């Protein structure tokens, strides 16, 4: 095996498209976004002779508690017959060179004893907190509209019909300037749910980069001339991703978000995309989880859960233990 940095977008895109991972966090655009927001990145290819068999977008994250190398929802390999030993050794050298305190990998591998053992053997341990969704909800779009409706929870179908009946309208936009409209809804959601928000500049930059090739779109639900629900949708790797959502409590009895999601699903299906990733959900038995209500909403559209190996850390310097303690405390404080 040989590790080489990939500089050509077409080489990267062709490989990722051939694997079709249920994530956009290993896309060329996500690397560009992180790079343009101040992070140092590398795109490594894993080669078996001359064949590209694996890829890993690596991001250097600088934090007061310690710098680290992050692989978000990766690495990506062509098949299950792989070894990340060579990549890990390469990253250990890079981490020392970049004065990083640890390596963090958020795998997109099925949560199984066999896959966990891959990391155990290399010295990794479970991270104190996840970086990206480790339990996601996936809807197969390769069905008829009738089959999709039939696969929904009855209450979800009823809410969609109610929104249509009372006159909710859905609008779409690929104009980055419309992030301003979304952010007003987003701020209301933050104030209501009390989570740490992304800045308007962050959302704007992400949308701009993905929209260059038509891979980002804004959806708005409007009722009585007011925007009451919105979503930022990313399309890549033969799928569509629900990355950011927002809503207003005004007209709370109007199920605008249900109709908005149904429109996203129908549009993605019409474009020939294979799946819809609703992104993170709460564990089934975690009734007091902050995402419990959102999980009920997402799972109502039908689909299945994908659970990934927990985020893994590999210590490089003793400063890692300080980071571990801080993140462990934050996780307990957030009730996750």
Image (cartoon, helix red, strand yellow):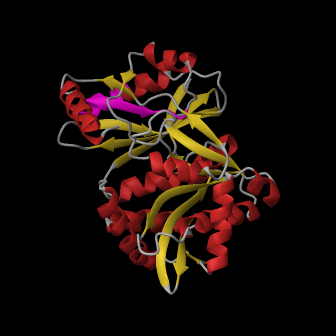
Viewer can see residue 8: no
Viewer can see residue 211: yes
Reply yes or no: does residue 103 show up in magenta.
yes
Residue at horizontal 26%, vertical 31%? 328
* Rendered location of residue 84, percent (x, y): 51, 23
Describe residue 34's horizontal placement relative to residue 215 as left or right. Answer: left
* Rendered location of residue 38, percent (x, y): 30, 55
Residue at horizontal 62%, vertical 79%? 166
Describe residue 60's horizontal placement relative to residue 27 as left or right. Answer: left
Image-quadrant location for residue 248: bottom left
Which residue of the protein is positioned furthest toward the bottom in this rendering? 225
* Rendered location of residue 322, percent (x, y): 18, 28
What segment is highlighted magenta in the picture? 92-108
Q: Nearer the viewer, residue 22 or 70?
A: 22
Q: Specify the quadrant that holds the C terminus.
A: top left
Q: Nearer the viewer, residue 146 or 8?
A: 146
Q: Nearer the viewer, residue 10 or 235?
A: 235
* Rendered location of residue 67, percent (x, y): 25, 38
Residue at horizontal 39%, vertical 64%? 203
Residue at horizontal 43%, vertical 79%? 177
Reply yes or no: does residue 24 show up in magenta.
no
Where is 273 relative to 246, above or below? above
Where is 120 relative to 76, above or below? above
Q: Specify the quadrant that holds the N terminus.
A: top right
Where is 86 relative to 64, above or below? above
Q: Nearer the viewer, residue 281 or 181?
A: 281
């Amino acid at each position: 095996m040989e590790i080489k940095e990939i500089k050509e977008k077409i080489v990267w895109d062709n490989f990722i498209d051939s694997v079709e991972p249920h994530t956009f966090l290993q896309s060329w655009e996500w690397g560009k976004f992180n790079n343009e927001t101040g992070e140092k990145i590398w795109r490594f290819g894993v080669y078996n002779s001359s064949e590209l068999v694996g890829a890993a977008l690596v991001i250097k994250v600088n934090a007061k508690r310690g710098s680290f190398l992050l692989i978000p929802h990766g690495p990506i390999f062509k098949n299950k017959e792989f070894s990340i030993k060579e990549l890990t050794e390469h990253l250990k050298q890079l981490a020392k060179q970049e004065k990083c305190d640890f390596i963090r990998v958020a795998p997109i591998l099925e949560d199984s004893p066999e896959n966990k053992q891959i990391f155990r053997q290399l010295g990794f341990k479970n991270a104190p907190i996840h970086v990206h969704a480790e339990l996601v909800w996936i809807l197969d779009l390769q069905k008829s509209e009738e089959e999709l409706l039939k696969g929904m929870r009855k209450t979800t179908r009823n809410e969609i019909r109610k929104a249509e009946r009372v006159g909710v309208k859905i609008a779409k936009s690929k104009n980055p300037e419309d992030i301003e409209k979304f952010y007003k809804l987003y701020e209301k959601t933050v104030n209501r749910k009390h989570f740490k928000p992304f800045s308007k500049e962050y959302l704007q930059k992400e949308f701009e980069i993905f929209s260059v090739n038509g891979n980002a779109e804004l959806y708005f639900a409007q009722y009585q001339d007011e925007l009451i629900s919105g979503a930022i949708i990313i399309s890549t790797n033969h799928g569509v991703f629900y990355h950011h959502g927002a809503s207003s409590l005004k007209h709370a009895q109007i199920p605008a978000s249900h109709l908005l999601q149904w429109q996203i699903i129908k549009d993605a299906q019409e474009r020939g995309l294979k799946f819809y990733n609703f992104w993170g959900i709460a564990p089934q038995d975690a009734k007091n989880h902050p995402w419990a209500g959102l999980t009920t909403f997402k799972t109502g559209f039908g689909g299945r859960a994908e659970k990934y190996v927990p985020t893994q850390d590999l210590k490089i310097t003793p400063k890692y233990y300080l980071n571990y303690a801080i993140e462990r405390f934050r996780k307990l404080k957030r009730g996750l």
